[in-house]
Amino acid sequence: MLSTEHTRLLIRLRWTAFFLLAAAYVLVFFHRTAPAAIAGELARDFDVGPASLGALASSYFWIYMVMQIPTGVLADTLGPRRIVALGGLVAGIGSIVFAQADSLTMAVVGRTLVGFGVSFPFIALLKINAAWFPESRFATLNGITMFIGNLGAASAALPLAWVVTLVSWRTVFVALGVLSMLLALLTWLRVRDRPEDAGLPTMRELDGRPAHPPMPVGDWKAGLRRVASNPASWPGLFVNAGIAGSLFSFAGLWGVPYLMAAHGMERAVAAQHTTLLLVVFACSCLLIGRLSDHLQRRKPVMLAYAAVYVAGWVPFALGIPLPPVASYAACALIGASAAAFSLTWACAKEVNPPALSGMATSLVNVGCFLGAALLQPLVGWVIQLTAPSIAEATPQAVTDGMRVLLLAAASGLIAACFVRETRGRNQTEQT
């Protein structure tokens, strides 16, 4: 039983760590989806067509994807505090380089640095959630995490589209670089990786159970082999590739150009649609995590949401003319049902030893960015088959691009059929 003083310390350190890393995660989502709102400016300033624009946007996802497994290893060995502080510094530098770029090559360099720097906060935040909160609240905390992160995504849609009418997009990204460095400093000074680092008992000890020993730094290779050789670790990666990949491709780049070309919307109105999609997605992540924890079921909830997600893409992929109410409803349905993939991290964590939670969650997280990195340029390539530039894109060209995203969503649903049900408990502790 903790004393009143220690209880207050636990609460203060728990929420300090959570909110500082959550603030860093807001910037992750902002950078992820910002190109959609400024696609026209980027194409104009760097004089590129749809395929090259897709490649520029996807450079973030490629490096983010490559860094996921190393991030999991580093989160399990060095801890969240060190890697998020370092990542914030690199992301800040990358944002400023991107803002000052005078060529497509330099823009890709800046975007790649940003992708490297922001590859750390999410896995680190999952590690914080696992260390500082009871296990029974893990999916709920993940939902809260996604909700907060999507505030950044929502601010990169309609608000950013409005801001760039007042100031240059370059000014916005310089300011983001400075903010990222400030958060890195605060993380270094204020975050503690585990309760033990502050002389407090672990969550398991407070629950009357022995603490899990931390993984020794030298054992990371064996830990990674154990996670990778576990067949139950992998289905979530493919769920994420299909569902998260298509969501990020639409909300992060192609949603606004599609709605403008296929449905004749003004940019501000198209941005309202992607903002609605992201806000509904954020709220749905809150609900699905709570629902899954309450039911103590992962797979049935994921499958139900994923099936609705696939259905949500049909009107866009078929090029059906939609009145405003229907187009807003379609975006809201896609956003609400996309929360299916947010359960994959809980599933991966619960089929692997607790000390390897960083590696387990990072493995499935690779799928989110592998999917987006492949789909963003692929959609651009499909559009460019019949339209040499975004300005000249026809309704049929952008609709063809949406068909790629429908197929990706369907592949995510199929992968969800192979996810192992954990009933909300770590399966390795029951053997």
Image (cartoon, grey):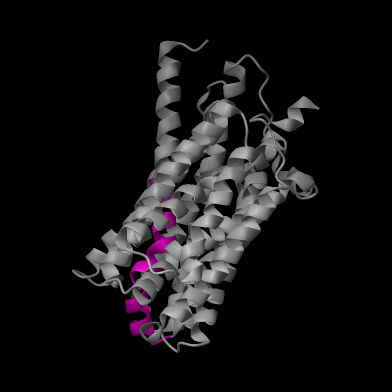
Residue furthest left in the image:
166
Could you tell me residue 67's position as x and y percent? 60, 59
Residue 40, by quadrant, is bottom left
Could you tell me residue 122's position as x and y percent? 51, 48
Could you tell me residue 22's position as x and y percent? 42, 44
Image point (51%, 51%), residue name: 338
Image quadrant where one finds the C terminus: top right
Residue in the foreground of this view, choosing between 14 and 6 = 14
Q: Determine whether 332 is above or below 427 in the image.
A: below
Residue in the foreground of this view, choosing between 320 and 7 = 320
Magenta stretch bounds: 22-48
Q: Determine whether 106 is above or below 180 in the image.
A: below
Q: Is residue 68 visible?
A: no
Q: Determine whether 269 is above or below 108 in the image.
A: above
Could you tell me residue 207's position as x and y percent? 59, 16
Image point (49%, 12%), residue name: 2
In the image, is residue 151 part of the stretch drawn in magenta? no
